[in-house]
Image (cartoon, grey):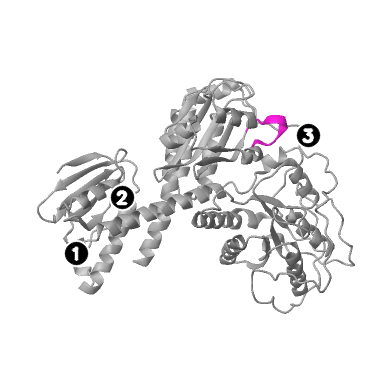
Amino acid sequence: MSLTGNLEDLPLLDIIQIVSFSKKTGYLTIRASSGLGAIVFHDGFVVASFTWDTAPIDPRTLPPPGERRQLLEARMGIALEQLVRLREGQFDFSLTTEVPQIVGGRDITPETLDLGINPQELLLNLARGIDEDRRDSSAAIEASFAQPSDEALAATPVPPVAEEAAGDEWEAPAESESEAPPAFPEEEPPEPVAGPPTMGPAPAPAPGEITASGPPAVPEAAPPVAPARTSIRTILLVDDEEDVRQALGESFKTGGYEVFGADGPAAAAKAAQRLRQRGGAFLLVTDLGMPTTGGASFQGGFEVVKRLWKMNLRPPVLMMTDRLSSALGARARQMGVSRFVFKPSLSKLDPEQYRADLQAFAGKLLSDVFPGLGSAPAPQPATEPQKRRVPAAAAIDVRESADELRQLQKLLEELRRPGDASRISQLVMRMAREFFERAILFLVKDDEMRGLGGFGSAPRGESLHLLVREVAIPLAEPSVFHDVAHGRKRWSGPLPAGRWSQHLLGRIGAFRSTQVALFPLVSHRETMALLFGDNPETGRELGRMDVLDVFINQAGVALENAFLQRKLAALEQRS
């Protein structure tokens, strides 16, 4: 039996399956850029495995036979996790009559199992691990665009705000009215601590910060000074979906916050009253899209803020939404909302994926949003669309000179550093700015691509970063987007005619664009995202795309490595 080839053509999981099902004895060597790895088989069972990172075992340090198998299985698990995720490399299977003692000049006798690992169990565990990484990668990419950029909000025109819709009004419930208790925690808040009986008005905003221009709070004599917002460690979490409150609440508590939950505006007011009696500041994290108390509107998040206003409470407000328009943004500014974030919503029909999305989203809030809430400069309304204009000549020079290679090298070095999906996504968009006047990153999930964010021109002076959140294109129907996502190969040229090409340009505007480029971001052998780029301002043709193609490919590898390192660390802890 001879089996030789390239991992690009035949994934390692398939090779293991072939050798296992044929019940062969021998060894499979994998030569990658990092070094040599191997998997050893006996009658189709895996008895040993190592990589370039696996230190040889000194036979004198081996534990007793009862503990030896556990140690060797743990070492093999770490090696196999690395090997099955390789995209590139040469493989060669050598058939033997007995289990070899030397592979690649390495004595593997001390690290070989007497009884091998069941191949079916092995394949199932490895495939499950890759599926989990794909799910977590998708969640992390979406979470990296959770917070609208200040540039995007600044570019969003703020029209005059009309009178509030008739459904938004509410009557304060009678004292005897029953209200749902907070969802987090189940026990009552502790007794009041020493301090002021109420939270006074919010401190004066920093220059450029979003402020509330709505009804002022009732003035108090000698109002107390609120603590610095970055020191707030209590969260009032309001969302009408129990699974959302539970997933976010658990993540926030793990991040060191005390969390109190409510399932609607009335319960939020009750929880806020208890927090005020206890004393101390809190952060309000509320969903926008939930029913109001009377059920006449689905913007209950605004009602939560108004209820707290009437209680003379002005906490920093983080509002979650799955969409954002200029009208909603304008109203939020008037109500003193500090930040908007995009809550994941694409995977509600898949409970495991949805929970992963929510956990990644919560991690993004903990790391990037909460620490600076109230201190980061907020965007100001723009009277004209803010566009990034790049002179055509300068852009062409970048592509045709050695500068592009230096930029590629610089960003590739950043990709190789330990990081997360958020930083990788940002690097992709930074690189895209060197090649396009407009670019959009689409998330690929559940056979659909949906816009996450972007930069460049948009119709009617809208923010492209916000506009693309409303763009969704199915990938089950024939289109150039389907071809790129499923074929995992880049495409460039005039956008082919078709229903979904017309739909996209109808939403984002064609302007003077004559050519477009589509790049798949492939991770774990699946397309996780699509990068769209064109030149709508100058209409110039696209330049060479080889450098960007290399970078997008390496971004997918970096995404895999980010999750692989996390998994390997967990395996090492267990061993």
- Mark number for residue 383? 3
In the image, which residues are magenta?
456-464
Q: Pointer 3: residues within 10 angstroms few (<14), some, or many (20+)?
A: few
At horizontal 57% and vertical 62% (from top left) the residue drawn is: 247
At horizontal 49% and vertical 34% (from top left) the residue drawn is: 477
Q: Give the quadrant of residue 546.
A: top left
Position of the N terminus, as image quadrant, is top left
Q: Position of residue 275 (x, y in %)?
A: 74, 70
Q: Position of residue 282 (x, y in %)?
A: 71, 65
Q: Is residue 357 above or below residue 151?
A: below
Q: Residue furthest bottom?
A: 191
Q: Residue furthest left?
A: 97
Give the foreground label among 1 and 3: 1
Is 480 in front, or is 494? 480
User: How far apart in space, not on screen, are marks 3 and 2 (Cα)?
Assistant: 55 Å
Q: Is residue 59 above or below residue 471?
A: below
User: How far apart in space, not on screen, are marks 1 and 2 (Cα)?
Assistant: 21 Å
Is 509 in front, or is 221? 509
Say if the magenta span includes residue 463: yes
- Residue hosting label 1: 115
Say if the magenta span includes residue 493: no
Q: Position of residue 161 (x, y in %)?
A: 83, 43
In the rendered view, does 264 fall on the left or right side of 218?
left
- Residue hosting label 2: 83
Disc 1, disc 2: CB below 8 Å?
no
Q: Secondary structure at mark 2?
A: helix
